């Protein structure tokens, strides 16, 4: 699976599903269940070599690295190796520019989604703790 396929099929659905779980607010049991599921999935510690890291931070750091890579790629001009006519070169450059810009916005959106999961989870956790203190 290529990097962009992995980004679209793994890195987008997971935070969107997490935000959906965190957005449940009416039945308090459902609210706690969604927060507990997100906590169990993303805040479990895993071993990555000698490091012990939470899964959310691993996904967030991978997303940031992908974003940094797209920033680096935006700076370079791509050369067509199979183009014969000047018209082909022009279209190829336009297509590659569009592709680079699309990848930039996709990776930025992905970083924003993971950051949003972190912020919404921390707010939801504080809300649940405040509701528990009021009872």
Image: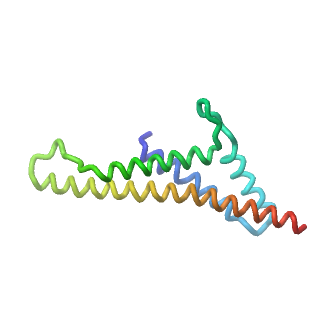
Q: Horizontal and vertical percent for residue 12? A: 52, 53
Q: Quadrant of the N terminus?
A: top left
Q: Horizontal and vertical percent for residue 93? A: 21, 54
Q: Quadrant of the C terminus?
A: bottom right
Q: Is residue 58 left or right of residue 123?
A: left
Q: Is residue 31 left or right of residue 70?
A: right
Q: Horizontal and vertical percent for residue 50? A: 61, 30
Q: How is the image coloured?
A: rainbow
Q: Toward the viewer: 79 or 22?
A: 79
Residue at 60% of width from left, 47% of height from top?
Answer: 57
Residue farthest to the right? Answer: 135
Residue at 50% of width from left, 55% of height from top?
Answer: 110
Residue at 27% of width from left, 49% of height from top?
Answer: 76
Q: Is residue 13 left or right of residue 94?
A: right
Residue 85 lies, with reference to residue 119, above or below; the image says above
Residue at 65% of width from left, 36% of height from top?
Answer: 52
């Amino acid at each position: 699976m290529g990097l962009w396929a992995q980004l679209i099929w793994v890195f987008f659905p997971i935070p969107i599903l997490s935000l959906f779980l965190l957005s449940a607010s009416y039945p308090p049991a459902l609210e706690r269940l969604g927060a507990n599921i997100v906590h169990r999935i993303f805040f479990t510690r895993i071993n990555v070599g000698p490091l012990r890291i939470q899964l959310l931070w691993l996904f967030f750091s991978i997303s940031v690295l992908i974003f940094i890579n797209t920033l680096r790629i935006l700076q370079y001009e791509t050369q067509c190796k199979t183009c014969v006519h000047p018209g082909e070169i022009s279209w190829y450059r336009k297509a590659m520019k569009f592709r680079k810009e699309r990848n930039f916005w996709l990776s930025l959106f992905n970083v924003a989604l993971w950051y949003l999961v972190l912020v919404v989870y921390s707010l939801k956790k504080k809300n649940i703790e405040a509701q528990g203190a009021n009872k």
